[in-house]
Image (cartoon, rainbow, N blue to C red):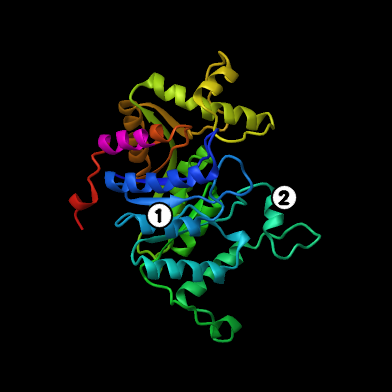
Amino acid sequence: MKLSVVDQSPIPAGFSAADALANTIDLARFTEALGYSRYWLAEHHATAAFAGPAPEIMIARVAAETATIRVGSGAVLLPHYSPLKVVETFSVLEALYPGRIDLGIGRAPGGSQLDAYALQRLRPSEAMHDDFPQQLAELLAFLGGHFPAEHPFSRIHVSPAPSGGLALWLLGSSGWSADAAAQLGLPYAAAHFINPASTRASIERYRAGFTPSAHLDAPKAIAAVGVICADTDAEAQRLYASQRLRRLLRDQGGDRGPIPTPEDAVARLGETPAQPPRDEGEWPRLFSGDVATVHERLAAMADALGLDELMLVTVVHGHEARRRSYALLADAFGLEPPQAQSL
C-alpha cells in the first residue's frame, strides 16, 4: 500500500499563516523521509483556517526542499484560471523538477461564491457560467498540442514545451468528475474527505467507463481520506475535538476561524458526544483513533475499493501531533525511506 499526503496548510489558533507554510515545508521533508509517495498542496481562498491560496508557489518551494517525493496540486481550481496559464506554470515546474510534478485539476471554487467572483478578471452582471468542461478540454489540448489545424490556438507554442513527465489528475467528489476522468482517460482522485457518500460509486463508475488514452492505459484511482492517528484512542479523540468544533460552527453558520486548540474545542463542545455527520457514507470522512484501529480501517477501505494508494489529510492544531499521525501510519503500513525503495 502506498501512502501520500494532501496538505491544506492549516493555520493553528495562536499562530500565523507564515507559521502554517513553514509547517508545510517541514511536513513535506518529514513525510518524504518516511516513504510517502506524493505531497499535494490544496487551494483555498479567503479563509482564516488555511494558508494555501496558491499551490503552484508552494509546489515550487516544496519540490526544492525535497528530492524524491512527487509534488503536486490537490487541486488547481481551474475555473479561476486560464488553461494556457496553468499549462505554462506547470511546464515550468516540470522543467525544474523533471518527473516529480503532478497537476491535479478540480472544479470547486475553494471558497464562497463571493470569493469566486472576486477572483474573476471579467465580472459579468449575470450569474457566472460554468464552462469547466470547455476549460478542461482546452487544457488537455495545450498539454498535448492537438488543437485542430483551423483552431487559432493551434498557432500557440507553449514554452517550456509540456513534458511527458507531468502527470495530470482529475480530482472530484461527485459522479461528474469520475465520468469525466473515465471518458478522458485520466487518473482519478476521489475527495472522500469532502464527500464520503459518493466515494465507492464514483470509483466504480470511473473504472466501468474508463477509456484508454495517451495519458493512461488502464484506470488509476486513489482516495483522499481524513485521518487523525495518535498513540492512544483517547489522545486521537482529544485532537479530533478541534475538527468537531469546526464542523459544529459550520453547521451553525458561524465563523470557524483558525484551527482551535483541543483544550478550547473540548471546553466549547462541553460534554456533547461526537455524532457521525449526517452526510457520512460507507466509511467516515475522517478516521480517528490509535494506530491499530486506523490502520485496520484504512486497509479495509482500500481493499474494498481495490486501491493501492491512499492520500491522507490530517488537520489538527499541533504540528508535532500532525507529524506523529503520519509517522505512526508510515510504520503501520511498512513504508520504506526513499533510499530503500526499489526504483
Q: Identify the residue at horizontal 35%, vertical 40% (top origin).
A: 302
Q: Is residue 192 magenta?
A: no
Q: Amino acid at mark 1?
A: Val
Residue 265: x and y in percent read 55, 23
Q: Identify the residue at horizontal 71%, vertical 60% (top origin).
A: 129
Residue 123: x and y in percent read 75, 62
Q: Is residue 146 above or below residue 331?
A: below
Q: Which residue is mark 2?
A: 114
Look at the image and tell me in which quarter the N terminus lies. Answer: top left
Q: Identify the residue at horizontal 60%, vertical 20% (top origin).
A: 268
Q: Is residue 188 above or below residue 275?
A: below
Q: Is residue 108 above or below residue 14?
A: below
Look at the image and tell me in which quarter the C terminus lies. Answer: bottom left
Instruction: Please give the label number shown on residue 176.
Output: none
Q: Is residue 299 left or right of residue 243?
A: left
Q: Which residue is mark 1?
A: 62
- Going from the N terminus, do you reach mark 1 or mark 2 first? 1
Q: Label 2 near label 1: C-beta < 8 Å? A: no
Q: Is residue 85 left or right of residue 327?
A: right
Residue 252: x and y in percent read 68, 28
| Magenta-drawn segment | 323-332
- SS class, disc 2: helix
